[in-house]
Each structure stands twice: as C-alpha cells, then as structure tokens.
C-alpha cells in the first residue's frame, strides 16, 4: 500500500521535530516511523492548511479498518495525552498515523510486536486552524 500524501503546518512540523529530538525511550520505533512520515510531508502555512487535514489539536473520527471500530480522538502533544478523554499523543502509534492525513485517506501503520493496522480518517470534528479562520470571519 502506497503511503498517502501528508500535509503539515510549518508550526506542527517544528514542534514535532523538537519532540523527536528527544523522544521517550519507550517509543523508539513509533518515533522513527513518525520521523520518516514528516520527512515526506508537504509543509504549508497554518493559514493555508485545508480544513480536512488532521493537525495538532484536531478532533477526528477515525476508523480502524481491521477491527471495524470507530473512535473519536484528539491528536495532542505528549504532556496533554489522556486516553480516557480521547486525547492521543502525536508520539503514540495512532497519533503518529493520523497527523497530516486528510478526511477519507487511509494509512497502514505497524507497531512493534503487532500486526499492521489500517486507519481511515472519517471526519474532522474540530481543527484549530479552521476554527481560527471562522473566528476571524474569513470564508
């Protein structure tokens, strides 16, 4: 399966690069895979990112295609992660898989010791950049 195009804002790219400069020991493979993903990302200014793209702090409906399970999660920085609240770290396998995807895109993501999972972005419920644009009255 060819990996889908991913889009990152310049701000998200810089923040993720900073996180990856000193990743927690417990996630070396996930950090390595995320590093590979962001290296191929198309970078755009926050003002130009599509409202259908998963950026940091985006609330999204994700479908795990292997198990046919749908969840609502928010992709956050590691210090804001809370599984019970549906906030997944961008350094987690799921957060790493979702960042930069567009609604409708599917990605296959594997983690150490597990069979690959396939995730599809079902819908964006909230994206900070889109909310900021609406608040500023920009169509």
Image (cartoon, rainbow, N blue to C red):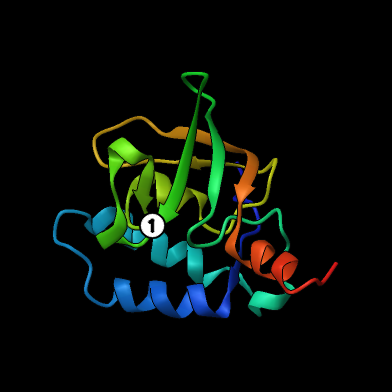
On-image quarter of the N terminus: top right
33 left or right, relative to 138: left
Could you tell me which secondary element the residue under label 1 belongs to? loop
State whether residue 37 is above or below residue 98: below
Q: Which residue is mark 1?
A: 90
Q: Is residue 19 above or below residue 6?
A: below
Q: Residue at 26% x, 41% y: name it.
A: 112
Q: Give percent across and percent down for residue 86.
A: 38, 40
Rendering coords of residue 87 (x, y %) = 37, 47
Q: Residue at x 49, y 35 (%)?
A: 72
Which residue: 57% across, 59% down?
A: 100
Quadrant showing the C terminus:
bottom right
Residue found at the far left of this picture? 25
User: Is residue 49 something that shows in the picture?
Assistant: no
Q: Characterize the local packing of mark 1: few (<14), some (14-19) or many (20 or more) Cα atoms within 10 angstroms.
A: many
Residue 85 x %, y %? 34, 40
How far from the left and from the top, in percent, is residue 77? 35, 62
């Amino acid at each position: 399966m060819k990996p889908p195009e991913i889009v990152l804002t310049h701000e998200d790219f810089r923040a993720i690069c900073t996180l990856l400069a000193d990743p927690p020991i417990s996630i070396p493979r996930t950090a390595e895979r995320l590093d590979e993903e962001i290296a191929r990302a198309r970078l755009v200014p926050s003002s130009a990112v599509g409202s259908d793209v998963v950026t940091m702090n985006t609330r999204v409906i994700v479908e795990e295609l292997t198990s046919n399970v749908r969840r609502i999660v928010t992709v956050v920085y590691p210090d804001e992660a809370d599984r019970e609240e549906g906030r997944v770290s961008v350094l987690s396998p799921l957060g790493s898989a979702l960042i930069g995807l567009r609604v409708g895109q599917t990605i296959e993501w594997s983690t150490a010791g597990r069979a690959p999972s396939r995730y599809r972005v079902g819908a964006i419920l909230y994206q900070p950049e889109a909310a900021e644009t609406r608040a500023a009255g920009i169509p």
